Image (tube, rainbow, N blue to C red):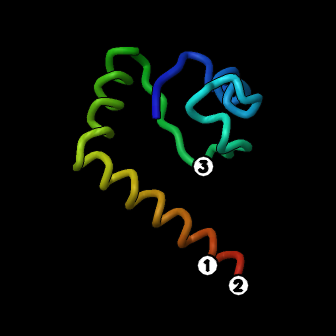
Amino acid sequence: MGYTSDLKKRFKEHNQGLNFSTKRYTPWTIIYYEACMEESDARRREKYLKTTQGNRLIKRRMKDFLYKKSKNLTN
Protein backbone atom coordinates (compact mmCIF):
# COMPACT_ATOMS: atom_id res chain seq x y z
CA MET A 1 0.00 0.00 0.00
CA GLY A 2 1.19 3.47 -0.70
CA TYR A 3 0.57 6.62 -2.63
CA THR A 4 2.14 8.01 -5.77
CA SER A 5 1.60 10.80 -8.26
CA ASP A 6 2.36 8.43 -11.16
CA LEU A 7 0.61 5.06 -10.80
CA LYS A 8 1.80 3.71 -14.17
CA LYS A 9 5.45 4.45 -13.34
CA ARG A 10 5.20 2.93 -9.84
CA PHE A 11 3.46 -0.17 -11.20
CA LYS A 12 6.14 -0.61 -13.86
CA GLU A 13 8.89 -0.29 -11.22
CA HIS A 14 7.26 -2.99 -9.09
CA ASN A 15 6.97 -5.39 -12.03
CA GLN A 16 10.58 -4.73 -13.07
CA GLY A 17 11.71 -5.76 -9.58
CA LEU A 18 13.05 -2.30 -8.70
CA ASN A 19 11.29 -2.27 -5.32
CA PHE A 20 13.13 -4.50 -2.85
CA SER A 21 10.10 -5.32 -0.71
CA THR A 22 7.89 -6.43 -3.63
CA LYS A 23 10.25 -7.83 -6.25
CA ARG A 24 9.92 -11.47 -5.18
CA TYR A 25 6.14 -11.30 -5.75
CA THR A 26 6.16 -10.20 -9.40
CA PRO A 27 4.24 -9.97 -11.65
CA TRP A 28 1.72 -7.60 -10.07
CA THR A 29 -1.79 -6.90 -11.27
CA ILE A 30 -3.76 -3.86 -10.18
CA ILE A 31 -7.20 -4.88 -8.99
CA TYR A 32 -7.98 -1.84 -6.83
CA TYR A 33 -6.83 1.74 -6.46
CA GLU A 34 -8.15 5.02 -5.14
CA ALA A 35 -7.41 8.48 -6.47
CA CYS A 36 -7.27 11.70 -4.44
CA MET A 37 -6.99 15.29 -5.59
CA GLU A 38 -4.68 16.29 -2.73
CA GLU A 39 -1.59 14.48 -1.46
CA SER A 40 -2.68 15.16 2.13
CA ASP A 41 -5.92 13.26 1.46
CA ALA A 42 -3.98 10.33 0.00
CA ARG A 43 -1.67 10.22 3.04
CA ARG A 44 -4.64 10.33 5.42
CA ARG A 45 -6.41 7.54 3.51
CA GLU A 46 -3.27 5.38 3.46
CA LYS A 47 -2.83 5.89 7.21
CA TYR A 48 -6.46 4.85 7.79
CA LEU A 49 -6.16 1.75 5.59
CA LYS A 50 -3.21 0.60 7.68
CA THR A 51 -5.35 0.61 10.85
CA THR A 52 -7.25 -2.50 11.92
CA GLN A 53 -10.56 -1.08 10.76
CA GLY A 54 -9.13 0.11 7.43
CA ASN A 55 -7.44 -3.24 6.86
CA ARG A 56 -10.77 -5.01 7.39
CA LEU A 57 -12.39 -2.69 4.84
CA ILE A 58 -9.79 -3.46 2.18
CA LYS A 59 -9.93 -7.20 2.87
CA ARG A 60 -13.73 -7.14 2.57
CA ARG A 61 -13.56 -5.22 -0.72
CA MET A 62 -10.96 -7.62 -2.10
CA LYS A 63 -12.97 -10.64 -0.96
CA ASP A 64 -16.11 -9.27 -2.64
CA PHE A 65 -14.18 -8.50 -5.82
CA LEU A 66 -12.54 -11.92 -6.00
CA TYR A 67 -15.81 -13.70 -5.20
CA LYS A 68 -17.62 -11.86 -7.99
CA LYS A 69 -14.74 -12.52 -10.39
CA SER A 70 -14.71 -16.27 -9.64
CA LYS A 71 -18.50 -16.40 -9.85
CA ASN A 72 -18.40 -14.77 -13.32
CA LEU A 73 -15.80 -17.28 -14.50
CA THR A 74 -18.01 -20.22 -13.57
CA ASN A 75 -21.10 -18.84 -15.35
Q: Height in image: 65 above or below 74? A: above
Amino acid type at mark 2: Asn
List x then y, in percent, for residue 66.
Answer: 56, 66
SS of the residue at dot 1? helix
Q: Which residue is mark 2?
A: 75
Query: For the view shown, which residue lies furthest in the right direction?
Result: 16
Q: Which residue is mark 1?
A: 71
List x then y, in percent, for residue 67.
Answer: 53, 72
Instruction: Characterize the local packing of mark 2: few (<14), some (14-19) or many (20 or more) Cα atoms within 10 angstroms.
Output: few
The quadrant where residue 70 appears: bottom right
The quadrant where residue 59 appears: bottom left
Q: Residue at x 65, y 44 (%)?
A: 25
Q: Which residue is mark 3?
A: 31
The quadrant where residue 10 appears: top right
Task: Give 2 or 35, whichever is nearer the viewer.
Answer: 2
Instruction: Characterize the local packing of mark 3: few (<14), some (14-19) or many (20 or more) Cα atoms within 10 angstroms.
Output: few
Q: Residue at x 69, y 23 (%)?
A: 18
Q: CA distance from mark 2 to mark 1?
A: 7 Å
Label 2–label 1 contact, CB within 8 A: yes
Sequence-wise, the earlier of marks 3 and 1 is 3
Q: Residue at x 28, y 46 (%)?
A: 54
SS of the residue at dot 3? loop
Q: CA distance from mark 3 to mark 2?
A: 21 Å
Amino acid type at mark 3: Ile
SS of the residue at dot 2? loop
Q: Height in image: 29 above or below 3? A: below
Label 3–label 2 contact, CB within 8 A: no
Q: CA distance from mark 3 to mark 1?
A: 16 Å
List x then y, in percent, for residue 15.
Answer: 73, 34
